[in-house]
Amino acid sequence: MTAGLLSGLPPPRRCRPLCPGTAAAAAAAAPPPPAGNGRAPAGGAARSSRLLPGRGGPARPGRPRRRVMALRALWVLRHEPRAVLFSRRYPTVEARAEAFNGSTHVAVPSDSDFLKAMLFELRLTDDQSFVEHRDTCTRIDHSSVRSVRVEGGDLWPVVAFQKSGLIYACLPLVEEALEPRPPLLTIPGLSQGLALLFGILDYISPSRKNEAELSAKAGQLRTLIIQACPLGTPLNTNISSLSSSFDDIQVVPTDVKQPAWRSNTYKGKPQVNVCITEKVKCMQYDKRDVVDMWQVYGAVNCKCDIEGAAPNVTLTLNLPTNGSPLQDIFVHHCVTSVDPAMLMSSSVNPLDDSVYSGPYKFPFIPPSESFNLCYYTSQVPVPPILGCYQLVEEGSQLKITVNLKLHESIKNSFEYCEARIPFFNRGPIAHLEYKVSYGQLDLSREKSLLVWVIGQKFPKSSEVSLTGTVTFGDIGEEHPTDYVCTGNTAYVKYGVFFNLHDLTSCHFEMYFRIPDFTLTGCYVDQHSVQIFAPGKPKITASRELISSDYYIWNSEASAPTMYPKRTPQDLL
């Protein structure tokens, strides 16, 4: 459910994935999907989530032990001010973890110690010095699964991501020794734990604007978690659908055919809504000795209103002839079976040349609420918008030049498209002279940000440009600062140590959305959706491409890079 898993090897040079600054990469958008550091058995990722709750312990003679999805602890933390908004521990699961892990077991620390360790792991402390075990280039995070160093040792696997100032974390149960660390695909609690955290995020997010409402939601969460995750076993990850009153607790279905995640049955006209959302992350430098990086993260969201206790649905994702194959596919626990070849294609290991080009078929029994059927990544050959940014200081002025080009393979129909050019560590913009070939340029109220609104289409030439000069006034406390875009600053970001020596080390960010389009070409054929239930359903399919952390750096200055610069031999 997040971007790929931990790996010390760099990805292929053809299309290098970004190193996410936060795990809500998972999120923020929609976070990238984990792929194990070992190969799972056939159908393992799908069938492991069908296990009955509470089945653990040693295996009986002659019978393989069933793995259980369970959590040892849950947390919702706040960075500023530091606080533990919510925590829940499960002593029975902790006792099982101690028995399974043996000498490699690390006990769950106190809430205050975990908060301190988690902030340190996410680099959210005031001390930004380089730490070997956390910031080394050999430890580049490709997922939301982390190892948090606490007093008793390294707490692993901690699923954690940051969103809107809050940190959502959980600790799944691992039913074996932790050294050597088992492949992530063999830990069924990871998928359900992440799904539960996303459910908590959806429940809490609307209350972020009001402190009193946030506190009330955190208080109600204690009652809701009793229903959603009794005894540490996630049963319903849609927290918003639950009632905060014990009088209206939904009981586990008595129909043996009805799965636990389908908490109620639908009555009415059958209908299925499917939406494919792809987010593209990008870092462009426009330099011969630095590799540009981009990556696509996709999610398939479904809402199935179908009668019956356990209706069977089969949905197929298709690619065009020239489409980019899907990788790191991670499916929802309601999927009943899956072709093992789909799960083997991974972007984490550059030596893995396995490619599965579809069709991607998912038979499943849908939950009652909206859910993400699967997550995936893809390595597309080119980014949708190519850019060049030049920012040069000439006396008391800055001279800016921006050139953008829409790739010919991209649909030229945007819901919105704009470039936001910030100026950190400077005073307000006192004077601005500019010329744009297309669109319009706006100045923010704080006079520290230029917003170039390109609109809903690029011109026929597919190229637009902006030139101008900017003069600044005296800097004040109300103007934005940035540790990266500054002079003589040593800074650690994304596990890489770098130095920037001039005030022109900056970037601008692209924001755009293209409806009815995906960068991979992935689509759902409405006629291929099979529903084994009474009535003829109404099927609606849509797709979209959204930018996420789409940065274009100043080519005339230093910039942070995640991988070493290329040698002259590489340029030949």
Image (cartoon, rainbow, N blue to C red):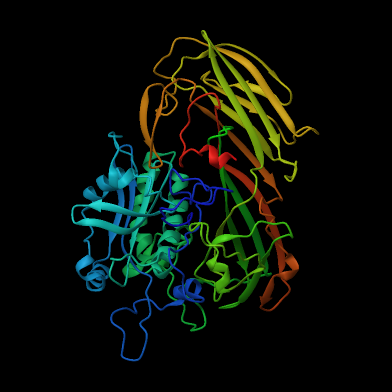
Q: From what the image shows, is residue 378 above or below residue 233? A: above
Q: Position of residue 283 (x, y in %)?
A: 54, 38
User: Going 81% across and 34% down the picture, which residue do you hit?
Assistant: 460
State the residue in front, 375 or 70: 375
Q: Position of residue 410 (x, y in %)?
A: 72, 44
Q: Can residue 397 be seen in this snapshot? A: yes
Q: Can residue 372 be seen in this snapshot? A: no
Left or right position of 443 against 209: right
User: Going 43% across and 59% down the picture, which residue do you hit?
Assistant: 194
Numbered circles on residues, count: 0
Q: Residue furthest top?
A: 395
Q: From what the image shows, is residue 291 above or below residue 248? A: above
State the residue in front, 315 or 240: 315
Q: Position of residue 461 (x, y in %)?
A: 79, 32
Q: Residue furthest right?
A: 460
Q: Position of residue 536 (x, y in %)?
A: 73, 73
- Quarter-wise, where is residue 49 in the image? bottom left
Quadrant in which the C terminus appears: top right
State the residue in front, 92 or 402: 402
Left or right position of 427 against 321: left
